[in-house]
Amino acid sequence: MDLTYDCSFKYFLKSKKTRYVLESIISLILDEPLEEVKKDLIIEDSELVDNFFKNEKGKITDILVTYKNTKINIELNRKYYKNDNAKIFL
């Protein structure tokens, strides 16, 4: 499975079998204990983000999760964009 494609990436990280991968990523990035992340992480519907992106109606994100009342947008890009600033929505 090539995880550099949106459909594979979404399927893999949202699957119940591999949820631990998503939990591990969030745990590492936020420097939170894995057990806390496992307990509190909620996977949201990534197509219902109109309220999240207040000025960008109709946006769809790859993975949208909530952890301790914080929305986290996880986005995959196959291309490298030189001089592109990374955006973190925390």
Image (cartoon, rainbow, N blue to C red):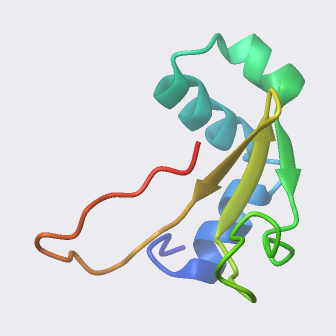
The one nearer the camera, 5 or 30, is 30
Residue 50 sits in quarter = bottom right
Residue at 73 percent of width and 87 percent of height: 57
Residue 16 shows in the view: no
Vertical relation: 18 (above or below) 60: above
User: Residue at 57% across / 80% down in the picture?
Assistant: 6
Q: Looking at the image, which residue sits at the far bottom?
A: 58
* Quadrant, the N terminus: bottom right
Q: Position of residue 43 (x, y in %)?
A: 84, 50
Quarter of the image where one finds residue 8 = bottom right
Q: Is residue 50 visible?
A: yes
Q: Position of residue 66 (x, y in %)?
A: 79, 42
Residue drawn 44% across the image and 74% down it: 4
Q: In this view, does 6 lie to the left or right of 53?
A: left
Residue 59 screen position, x and y as percent? 68, 83
77 relative to 29, above or below: below
The one of 51 and 88 positioned closer to us in this rendering:
51
How far across and how far down the image is residue 41, in percent?
Answer: 82, 34
Outermost residue, left side = 82
Image quadrant containing the C terminus: top right
- With respect to residue 18, does 34 lie above or below? above
User: On the picture, is 87 further left or further right than 40?
Assistant: left
Say which residue appears at 79% left-offset and 71% top-offset: 49
